[in-house]
Amino acid sequence: MRKSLYFCILLFFVRMKRNKFYLIALAALTVLAGCSNDTETTDGDSEININKNVVTGNLPSEVTRLEFPKLKDGNNCVIVHYAKEPGGTNKDVNYAVEWDTKKKANRWTCYIMTTNNQQDIVKRKPYTSTADQYPQDPNLPNSYRFSTDPFRGSGYDHGHLCPSADRLYSRDANDQTFYLTNMIPQPHDFNAGMWEKMEAEVRRLLEKQVSFDLSHYKVDKDTLFVVKGGTMDKSDQIARTLSNGLIVPKYNYCALLMKCHDGYMAMGFWFDQTKNYSDSDKPENYIVNIDELESLTGIDFFCNLPDEIENRIERLPRENLKRIWGY
């Protein structure tokens, strides 16, 4: 079915080469190449998933969700926070964290964005100069955390991973984003600069209406799976370790998986947070494919997708990604 569709579009593309519809056909072909059909089979391979997360021991069942990366072996725990979405239940997942219990640091935060949970119903948590602004995570055992907020007086910002602005659908959801487990230390200029730009860009990607309609084929964006973090697994990817033991990442990343009408597409952002970014610099200049992001971080993103789909969407060249995502 898909091969036939490729052929029909390619034939149309050749016949209309000198016609104004040339660009429309090319755009549609580009999207088809990057948005893999989650119902497609290739000799049954699309259902094979060797690297998926498996629920064992005390792991929460949510680790099999699409936004979850492959879990690290040893010295880690997974924390899932719940907050009722509009029209939802108390078991709606707000965001989840993989916590390195030895380094006492966030390895990544993952969550999903939909039109439903992007509603602005409450205001951002009011600022306070007390420890209540960034409280301890009640789901993290005392032995795995700093006894006091290690960010205070460090010279680094509390860098949100699941942003407050992405969780304004309820008071509980927004307040949970201020837990210390959802933070990484970031230089203020980076946190309030390129990182904030990237967060706004991710929201724009969900809201942006990009669709191609050709031969009754349509691509719609409806769900965005997000993973964010700072590098901490390799010594050369740590900027410094403070005297109180707080690890400052050298690099920050964001991995995105978009659920489309006909499948999925994926890309990432990679930033050196020790770099000085100009006011005119844009997040799109730091796009990478997921294969490269996995090599840089050592993390296997979107491992719960069938292997055939995962491999196809994660290896696309950067320029193809930019076209597929509307840049």
Image: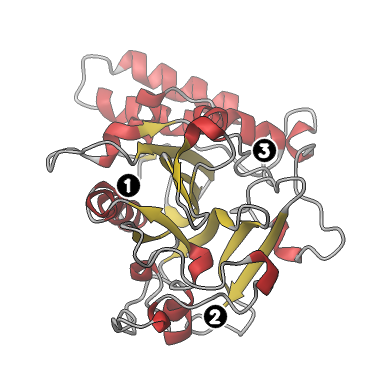
Closer to the chain start, of discs 1 and 3, is: 3
In the image, residue 87 above or below residue 309: below
Task: Read off the residue under disc 2.
Answer: 83
Q: Tell me how the rendering is colored.
A: secondary structure
Give the distance between the C-alpha atoms of the residues marked 1 and 3, in whole angstroms. 23 Å
The amino acid type of the residue labelled 2 equals Ala
Type of the residue with mark 1: Val
Q: What residue is shown at x 82% (from left), y 66% (from top)?
A: 58
Q: Secondary structure at mark 1?
A: loop
Q: Residues within 10 Å of mark 3 (few under 14, many from 20)?
A: some
User: Which residue is under mark 1?
Assistant: 210
The secondary element bearing badge 3 is classed as loop
Residues at marks 1 and 2, CA–CA distance in whole angstroms: 30 Å
Q: Name the residue beneath numbered marker 3.
A: 40
Q: Compared to 158, does 26 lie above or below? A: above
Which one is in front in this view, the residue at disc 1 or the one at disc 2? 2
